Amino acid sequence: MKLLLVILSVLACFPTFANGISTEAISLTSHWVGFAALAIFALAYVFVIFEEKFHMRKSKPMLLAAGLIWVFIAVIYQQVGDIHSAEVAIRHNFLEYAELFFFLLVAMTYINSMLERQVFDALRDVLIIKGFSYRALFWLTGILAFFISPIADNLTTALIMCAVILAVGQGKPKFIAIGCVNIVVAANAGGAFSPFGDITTLMVWQKGLIDFETFFKLFIPSVVNFLIPALIMQFALPLGKPDAIAAEQVKIKKGGLVIVGLFLATIVTAVSFHNFLHLPPVFGMMTGLAYLKFYGFYLREFGNTHIDKSDIPTSHEVEDDFDIFDKIAKAEWDTLFFFYGVILAVGGLGFIGYLSLTSSFIYGELGPTTANILVGILSAIVDNIPVMFAVLSMQPEMSQLQWLLVTLTAGVGGSLLSIGSAAGVALMGQARGQYTFFTHLKWTPVIALGYFASIWVHFLVNG
């Protein structure tokens, strides 16, 4: 606390922009606070990129960066007598994070529940018994990711397919790494042609800039974006098939398929909440969590497998050991806290004025086509949500063709780097040590080839 007071006292000594009280937004892009915020964010991302080298989880530097950036902003606004603007801005960013947090938490809880019920283990055994090679498994998971992500979302789809890759590819880290890269590209490409496939497409649809059915014009460009990297990466896959399982084939525990059905029902609920009731999808996901909690109660109280649990305060014998809060506890918390740091830190940079400044320059000086292509590249470095939010806030004069282009590039551009999309970040946590920033970076040139090819096909088909 003493150190914090000293820092705040030092900050108060710096010159300010105004001598009197002001409630107008302050541009800090050329102020020491802006430069400090950029330096802090860049340094934090260095630690994220070299997570495996420093042996420091990626959430730690981003949490600290977000806090410091907003402390600097709040101090400057306090100096000019504005005690509300920073508070309103940070609450807005925190609300965006809260929606993402609970959406992800429900998805992760369902996935952990399916893992505990051995759904993915059984799927792994089925795929092995079918005699699929590593190359066939590579294509199967990629195609499934591409076609599931428009219905669910790219993050949830990637988590599910990654669980399959991890189960099937035991002892083959090279297959897991390439398979995860393929899943990220496929999930992001599949999410680009559906309003529900990615948060950025949802934002564009909510603004009324593109009709629901118009999004499907991006289907063919999205297919190209997925296929070109996959066609090249397949040649680096290990030969052969997964080792046969010597033990008895894993069977799905009681209720495993029911939980899969409940997860699909949860996705339908989330989509319906948004499409018909005009409510945020996260409320549908939280309602779907109730489905799982009630079914978990049924498994524990009325299941067929009798398990003596003397440590559970019940007056009768517990029927199953399914514990929903255990599944919640096993969520990828490092990833969830990393998202908090990214959203709040990037939100702070946007509040300072850097995102608007960048958008104004690229649209005003470079033109919409070049600007929209750069938006996709930028979304690989900075999260595509604030980038797209900056574009929508500017509302540049563009044709429908260009709005479709920026929707495509913002959706698939994040595939260029593992940190460029929620799917990539989540898989780095799920396949820790096997799918990393550098394993993805190795294939960035190939992914970039698919990125630019999809843009060319978009103009060829829709232009």
Image: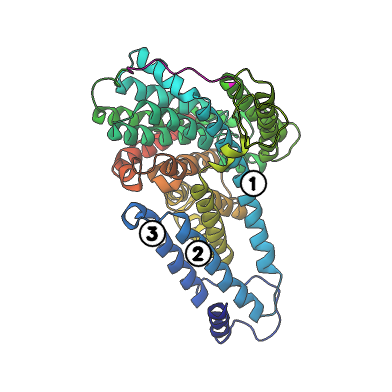
* Image quadrant where one finds the N terminus: bottom right
- The 10 Å Cα crowd at callout 2, few under 14, some 14 to 19, many 20 or more, is some
Q: Which residue is mark 2?
A: 64
Pick the front one: 175 or 93: 175
The part of the chain drawn in magenta is: 245-255
**Side of 445 where 223 appears, left or right:** right
Which secondary structure, mark 2?
Answer: helix
Asked whether residue 248 is drawn in magenta, I would say yes
Query: Percent position (x, y) of residue 231?
Result: 31, 27
Q: Nearer the viewer, mark 1 or mark 2?
A: 2
- The 10 Å Cα crowd at callout 3, few under 14, some 14 to 19, many 20 or more, is many
Label 1 to label 2: alpha-carbon separation: 21 Å
**Side of 24 where 143 appears, left or right:** left
Secondary structure mainly formed by the magenta segment:
loop
Query: Percent position (x, y) of residue 437?
Result: 35, 47
Q: Residue at x 40, y 18 (%)?
A: 125
Q: Residue at x 46, y 25 (%)?
A: 120
Q: Which residue is mark 3?
A: 47
Amino acid type of the residue tagged 1 in the rendering? Glu
Asked whether residue 332 is drawn in magenta, I would say no
Pick the front one: 156 or 349: 156
Q: Which residue is mark 1?
A: 99
**Sequence-wise, which precedes: disc 3 or disc 1?**
3
Label 2 to label 3: alpha-carbon separation: 12 Å
